[in-house]
Amino acid sequence: MILYTVTVKVNKELKERMNMIKINWSEYIRKAIEQKIVLEERRKAAKKLLESLKAGKHVVPKGFINETIRGMRETL
């Protein structure tokens, strides 16, 4: 797997505070980015679904949207 570099700048105070917490910051940031991408992809899919529903193209089973939203919230 080829990895690419992404640079994040933080101020001195934040960097000092980060140094006091011994975790793999690169791995933490990678996971946070991935979670954000998944969330945005879900939002985009939900928006597309709602637009098609408003246009009358699809019928959704009762309770489906509420269950989907709950599921999205639980993954945060």
Image: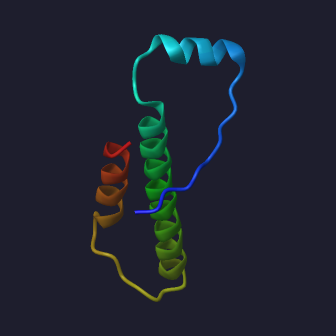
Residue that extends furthest to the front in the rendered view of this protein: 2
Which residue corresponds to the image point at 38% horizontal and 42% vertical from the top-left?
76
In the displayed structure image, the side of residue 26 where residue 67 appears, left or right: left
Which residue corresponds to the image point at 61% horizontal and 47% vertical from the top-left?
6
Q: How is the image coloured?
A: rainbow
Quarter assignment of residue 23:
top left
Which residue corresponds to the image point at 49% horizontal and 56% vertical from the top-left?
3
Quarter assignment of residue 12:
top right
Taking depth in this image into account, of 33 and 46 the one nearest to the observer is: 33
Does 14 appear above or below 69?
above
Taking depth in this image into account, of 27 and 65 the one nearest to the observer is: 27
Residue 45 x, y percent position in the rendering: 47, 70
Residue 9 x, y percent position in the rendering: 70, 32
Does 25 appear above or below 57?
above
Which residue corresponds to the image point at 40% horizontal and 63% vertical from the top-left?
1
Residue 2 x, y percent position in the rendering: 46, 62
Residue 36 x, y percent position in the rendering: 49, 50
Taking depth in this image into account, of 56 and 32 the one nearest to the observer is: 32
Q: How many marks?
A: 0
In the displayed structure image, the side of residue 64 where residue 57 appears, left or right: right
